Image (cartoon, rainbow, N blue to C red):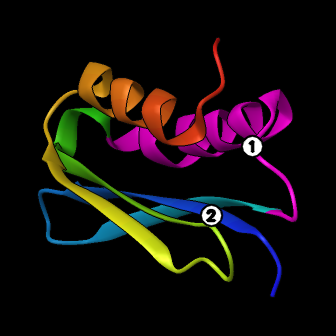
Amino acid sequence: MSLVNRVIVTCRIENGDSIDVSVKALDRDYNKDDVQKLGMKMAKLFGQHADDTLYYQVRSWSGEGGKTRRNWSRLRTADELSDVLKDVMGVAD
């Protein structure tokens, strides 16, 4: 079985909709390109809803076959989201 690292960030907005963005690294750890790719996706899709955002959620899968799962719910600020993503992805800015 291969090493799978995947993270999904969900933005829940006031009208009840949610927007998901993700990044996946197969057979390797996350690198700076993965962090930048996720950041660009979040800026593009979440940016237009910044004033309407209720909270963010982060889900991650890691390890052999992605069996190790972790979740963070109801992150209220972009700073909280950033701290969690730094922890999950393990890549410095």
Q: Position of residue 79 (x, y in %)?
A: 29, 19
Q: Position of residue 14 (x, y in %)?
A: 12, 57
* Residue plotted at (36% across, 35% down): 84
Please determine whether, in this image, residue 83 is positioned above or below residue 29.
above
Please determine whether, in this image, residue 41 is positioned above or below residue 51.
below
Disc number placed over residue 47 in the picture, else none: none
The residues tagged by marks 2 and 1 sit, at their Cα atoms, a distance apart of 9 Å
Q: Amino acid under label 2?
A: Arg
Q: Mark 1 sits on what residue?
A: 30
Question: Secondary structure under badge 1?
Answer: loop
Relative side of 11 to 13, left or right: right
Residue 65, picture quadrant: bottom right
Category of crowding for the residue at label 1, using alpha-carbon neighbours closer than 10 angstroms: few (below 14), some (14–19), many (at least 20): some
Magenta-drawn stretch contains 44 = yes
Q: Position of residue 44 (x, y in %)?
A: 60, 41
Count of labels in the image? 2
* Residue plotted at (80% across, 27% down): 32
Disc number placed over residue 6 in the picture, else none: 2
Q: Amino acid under label 1?
A: Tyr
Who comes first in sequence, dot 2 or dot 1? 2
Range of residues picked out in magenta: 26-49
